[in-house]
Amino acid sequence: MVYHARHLRSLASRGLASLRSRGLRHTLQRLRERRRVPGSIDAAPNTRASGERPLRLPRPSRPRASIVVPAYNHLPVSLACLRALADSGDQTSFEVILVDDASSDSTPQVLPGIPGLRYHRNPHNLGFIGACNAGAEMARGEFLVFLNNDTTVQPGWLDALLATFDTHPDTGLAGSKLVYPDGRLQEAGGIVFADGSGWNYGRFEDPAHPRFNFVREVDYCSGASIALRRDLFLNLGGFDSHYAPAYYEDTDLAMRVREKGLKVRYQPASVVVHHEGISSGTDLNSGVKAYQVVNQKKFLARWGEVLARSHAPAGQDAGLASERGRIHQVLLLDACTPTPDRDSGSVRMLALLRLLRECGCAVAFFPENRAHDGAYTEALQQLGIEAWWHPHLGDVPRWLARHGRRFDTVIVSRHYVLSPLLPLLRLHAPQATIVFDTVDLHHLREQREAELSGDPAQQRVAARTRKVELGLIAQSDRTWVVSEAEKTLLAKELPEARVDVVSNIHDVRGAGPSFEQRAGLLFVGGYRHTPNVDAALWLANDILPRIRERLPDVELHLVGGDAPESVAALGALPGVTFHGYVPDLEPLLGASRVGLAPLRYGAGVKGKVNQSLAHGLPVVATRCAVEGMHLVDGEDVLVADDAEAFAEHVVRLHSDAVLWQRLAQGGLENTRRYFSAEPVRATLRELFGTPPAA
């Protein structure tokens, strides 16, 4: 009850502040977005393929993937599998090779006549291993995909499976999420214990649950649906006939892939319904299934030393054993799911999540609003983040009571998220290091806004925020700020606090197009952030007219989502183009000649400045906009705080190629030195006391 009361007070306070700054309509819109509850994430699987159209499979001359389907009898099952492949709608080019393992039914009479299918019949029964290896020898694709014939692939399964190799380049083998026909989960990656026994992680659970919906490094993936590069498979000698006719060949293959220094990953976005038992039965005492027991002993004899050294002991909790290679357990909380195409804070958060994974951390994340944010949440899952959402998350205090003790580190961004949570974290995760990620010192921004407006109510809000932030810093084990300036300020306020700089994180994109190839001015800002609204209005109404007196043809591009009417209306002014939300800023960053940051108040490090400098786009800014960024006026940036001086700097920079080139180079070097990933890596290494994972 205490948490809920504090949370409601926090929401009410932020709602009042939003009403003052954004007005009723935009406040209600934001509230609806924050409290939305998603619909079902995983629909019931499609287990029956349509038979209305004639069955025809693609047969490209240069397929990216060769799908090898071993089959022995059960013709209707094979036909249903092929129909699902034909109807999947995947964009990846693929061929299908069906290996008939000497079937005795009508398979050899029917399947060769299917257009597009590459049909191969073994002269005698070779078993699963022999059939797969025979199909691999025929393949022409860059990737081999082994698919049981008793499966029904779901739309997009192949695109998602192969995307694993693009997103995670060190992937050697990737496997699908396997689901039973009744909708229950069959496997979300496999676990191999130290005694050689295996377990299908998540068996009989809900396949939509967050625990089973993020990319993970795993011990193995079931051979019912796996992919790897053809060259790697052939180099490894294919599936080992040591395990003929079947079972443990997929587990052994995963071990050999890791021996090559590559990873085995589970891909939850690749969904395949597996009608387990149709081909081999389920009785461990008879038929092919009996080889599962025999081959476990063979597997243990071969890999015993490796298993003892790097695999979980038999009987360990499957949840703890499910994600191999993770040294630390981290919980990260923020107000919302990162939206990196909409705001700079999300760019920083996404980069931070990547670095935590790089440092060997298993990372769980949930936003304060508990929403599944569609593609943004899915992007976290593809990164390897265990993203939680309602209703699986449920009540936050109950969730922490259940899961809190598994985490050794908890990172909470923003004071209004941490404030109601801190007592709960101390209660349910007493072993964890609590890190308060300020993002920026909110009270500093609010103080400056109050000074600019002269509003006593805003001054009181700033004072309350200051009290809350300083109190949380004093109670947390560590605090992160985004600039040395804020660290210095806190050293005076709270000299005993442990404060580190974890600033914005950007990739240096390079110089880009030359001075002569560019023209015009660019301002980027998310307009939920009130300093950006003030900056856009000041820029268009007071600064731009002074610029156009000397550069009458110059164009100002205003970019950013969630703009109030006052900002959107600026597009009607001479020389102003209002773009609104732009999903890809690269073209504008490469075409503009001068970036602008006319912020009159704010705090922290400004992502718009970092972003421009990282792309070789020189910037004219106010002192507030470049505070704490180690930028030198005239060398890396031009700085001015009044409209006339700001306009003069813009005109000069837009006209002087030599000055432009000097500032562009200075900005790139500043990004490399202070705002790339390496400074943050150093802080994380110190926090966790371990080197980054290889």
Image (spheres, helix red, strand yellow):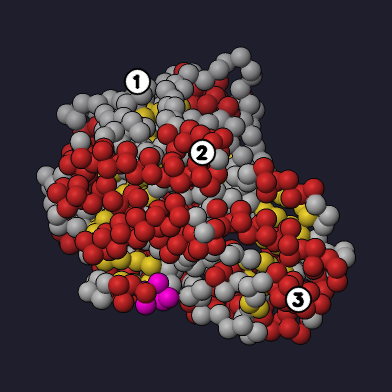
Residue 555 in sight here = yes
Q: Quadrant of the N terminus?
A: top left
Q: Which segment is the magenta one? A: 484-488
* Chief secondary structure of the magenta portion: helix
Query: Residue 683's x, y, as percent?
Result: 34, 72
Front-most of residues 42 and 520: 520
Residue displayed at 32% across by 69% down: 684
Mark 1–mark 3 distance (CA, rounded to whole Å): 69 Å
Judging from the image, what secondary structure is the residue with disc 2 in? helix
Q: Is 595 placed left or right of 414 in the picture? A: right
Quote the CA–CA distance across marks 1 and 2. 43 Å
Q: Which residue is mark 1?
A: 182
Is the residue under label 2 in contact with that under label 1 (CB below 8 Å)? no
Q: Residue 27 bears which disc, if any?
A: 2
> Along the polypeptide, which appears first: circle 3 or circle 2?
2
- Give the camera-side residue of 26 and 102: 26
Vertical placement of residue 79 versus 666, above or below:
above
Position of residue 559 relative to residue 5, above or below, is below
Point out which mark residue 648 bears: 3
